[in-house]
Image (cartoon, grey):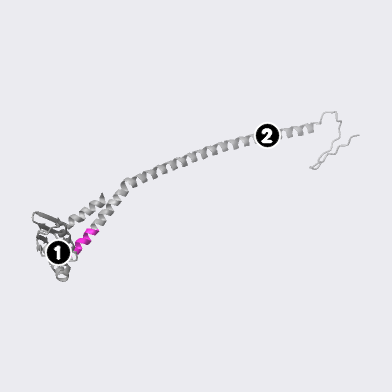
Amino acid sequence: MTETTITLKLPIRRVVLGDPSAPPPEWLQGHHRRLAHFALSEAGASTTHRAANSAASAELDTRLSEQIAAVEQAANQLQLAAKTMQTHWQHIVLPELQQTTIELAHAIAAKLVLDRVLSDQFPIENVVREVVERLNTDQPIVVKLHPADLAVWQQHVESHVSATTLGDQVRVQADAALARGDCQASSGEVSIVYELRRQIEELRQQLVS
C-alpha cells in the first residue's frame, strides 16, 4: 500500500469519494473549465500589458531622441554665436574701443596742455632752448613768440639767470601771427617752426597707427 501526503493551503470545502477509473463528475469538470479560462485570461492580460509597456517604452525613446537632438542643435547654435561674437569683438568692437580710447586720451591731453599755455604755466623756455639747439649755429638767431608767451619768457629770464646762457646772439621778439605755445627761430636762410597743436596731433597719429 502506497501512502501519499498532500499539504493543503486552503480550507477543504468538499470531499467526494468516487471510482478513480470513472470520469470526473460534472461539477468538477466545470470547475476545471473555469480554472482553464481564468488562466487563459491572465495570460492574455499579461500579453496586452507587455505590449502596452513596449509601446510606451518606444514612445519614450522617441521623445528622448528628439530632446537630445534639440539640445545638440541648441549647443551648435550657441557655439556658432560665440564664434560670431568673438570675431565681431576682435575685428569691430576692439578696434573701435581702441580708437575711442586714443581720441579721448588725446582730447584730455590737448586740453591740459592748452590750459597750461593759456594760464601762463607752459614751460615756453624749454621750447625756445630746443628750437635754438636744433639750429646748431654760431650765427645770430631770431626767436619769435606770441606776445603773451614773450611776456612769460621775459619773466623767466628775470628770475632764472640760466636762461641767459643761450648767448648774446639769440634775440627773442613778439609775433602776433603765432599761436600761443608756438615758436619760430631763424638764422640766415634757415628757419625752424615749432607748432604746439601740430605736435599734439602728430602724437595722436602715432598712437592711432
Residue identifier under label 2: 43
Going by the numbered disc 2, the residue's amino acid type is Ala
Closest to the observer, 190 or 69: 190
Going by the numbered disc 1, the residue's amino acid type is Leu
Q: Position of residue 206 (x, y in %)?
A: 24, 51
Residue identifier under label 1: 166
- Per the image, label 2 sits on a secondary structure element best described as helix
Range drawn in magenta: 108-118
In the image, taking residue 18 as reference, residue 150 lies left or right, namely left
Seen from this angle, which residue lies furthest bottom? 159
Closest to the observer, 107 or 192: 192
Q: Position of residue 53 (x, y in %)?
A: 60, 37
Residues at marks 2 and 1 touching, judged by CB atoms closer than 8 Å: no
Q: Quadrant of the N terminus?
A: top right
Identified at 14% across, 68% down, the residue is: 157
How many numbered marks are there? 2
- Residue density around tag 2, few if under 14, some if 14–19, many if 20 or more, within 10 Å: few
Q: Earlier in the sequence, mark 2 or mark 1?
A: 2
In the figure, residue 17 lies in which quadrant?
top right
In the image, taking residue 25 as reference, residue 187 lies left or right, namely left
**Does 8 appear in magenta?**
no
